[in-house]
Image (cartoon, rainbow, N blue to C red):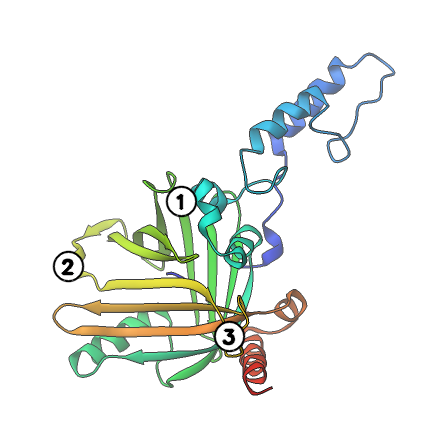
Amino acid sequence: MPIAFDQRRFGGVGFGVAGSDLRDRSRAAAPRGTAVKRPDTADYHSAPIFGIVARQLERPTRMPGALQNAATQWFGPAFDRLHPLLQTLHRSGGTLGGEIAISTGTGLAGRIGRRLARKLGIPVDRPRRGFRVDIVHDEQQMQWRRRFDDGSELLSIFRPVGRYPDGHWLESTGPARMKLGVDPGGGGWRWRLLGVDVRGVPLPLFLFPRTDAYKRIECDERGESGERYRFAVAFSLFPFGELLRYEGALHAIPAVSASSADPAGAALFAAHSSAERVTT
């Protein structure tokens, strides 16, 4: 899917070994007695050596001077087509929570859907559950950790290949890996399944459940724009029809609440907050 991991484990891009080598060279090149600026205080755009590093890392971006992550780099100029709240979420990461609906098909479709849910770690014993998703980016990948209020978790790692519109993403969820295209529209995006492999073995698409997944920002019940993050993920298989679906409208969880609460507690907190928004 779409809608990882400690949010503070990622973010800043350090200089690493290459940076250390450049610092050593800068000290060696400086005349004796000349102070050399430390990289954390240097003006990268005026210091000759560190200016080169900065220009290499700071590719053209929506925010001048900000380093890019996997999402902003993959979308490029098309990143502007996303709703501003989606841009913020996929530039800086964040935590969303609320109550979601979970359903399976009927008859044989229901049996297949429940089996698929068990493999994915999605609880289907109740039609509605508290839910939370933590989203973190670095330069190589996106990580989405989905947590249900019974303690179940579903972790997906998304790695970009190429750039929009010709590129795609590889979503790894357990042993399965899906090749996904993206169709932006209406400020959101819809995933498009292009291929599947399990433990490295490609599978014909007709053998794998069709995935329909999207996310967008919508008005809440009070008509205020940008209040809710609407998502849906559905799996269907011909000729059985829809096997499994989970969907909901989520609110952002403040960083303090997200970091201090346990997964189930955070999801319930978010669901309770959502209920208060509707009733007040």
Q: CA distance from mark 3 to mark 2?
A: 37 Å
Residue positioned 74% across, 15% down in the render? 28
Residue at image location 18% in from the left, 56% down from the top: 205
Figure quadrant of residue 270: bottom right
Of the residues shown, which amino acid type is indicated by label 2?
Phe
Mark nearer the N terminus (3 vs 1): 1
Q: Nearer the viewer, residue 131 or 4?
A: 131
Q: Which residue is mark 1?
A: 160
Whether 131 is drawn above or below 184: the answer is below
Instruction: Categorize mark 2 by other alpha carbons within 10 Å: few (<14), some (14-19), many (20+).
Output: few
Q: Nearer the viewer, mark 3 or mark 1?
A: 3
Would you name the residue on which mark 2 appears? 206
Q: Is residue 6 visible?
A: yes
Relative to 20, does residue 92 appear above or below in the rendering? below
Describe residue 266's horizontal placement relative to residue 232 as left or right: right
Q: Is residue 279 above or below residue 102?
A: below
Q: How many marks?
A: 3
Q: Residue furthest right?
A: 33
185 is higher (above) or lower (below) than 250: above
Judged from this view, the residue extending furthest toward the front is 223
Q: For marks 3 and 2, give the one nearer the viewer.
A: 3
Tags 1 and 2 touching, CB below 8 Å: no
Q: Earlier in the sequence, mark 3 or mark 2?
A: 2
Three-letter amino acid code at the position of disc 1:
Pro
- x%, y% of residue 160? 40, 44
In the drawing, does residue 211 fall left or right of residue 58? left
Give the residue at x 44% y 57%: 187
Label 3 element class: loop
Q: Quadrant of residue 189?
A: bottom left
Quarter holding the N terminus is bottom left
Q: CA distance from mark 1 to mark 2?
A: 24 Å
Q: Amino acid at mark 3?
A: Asp
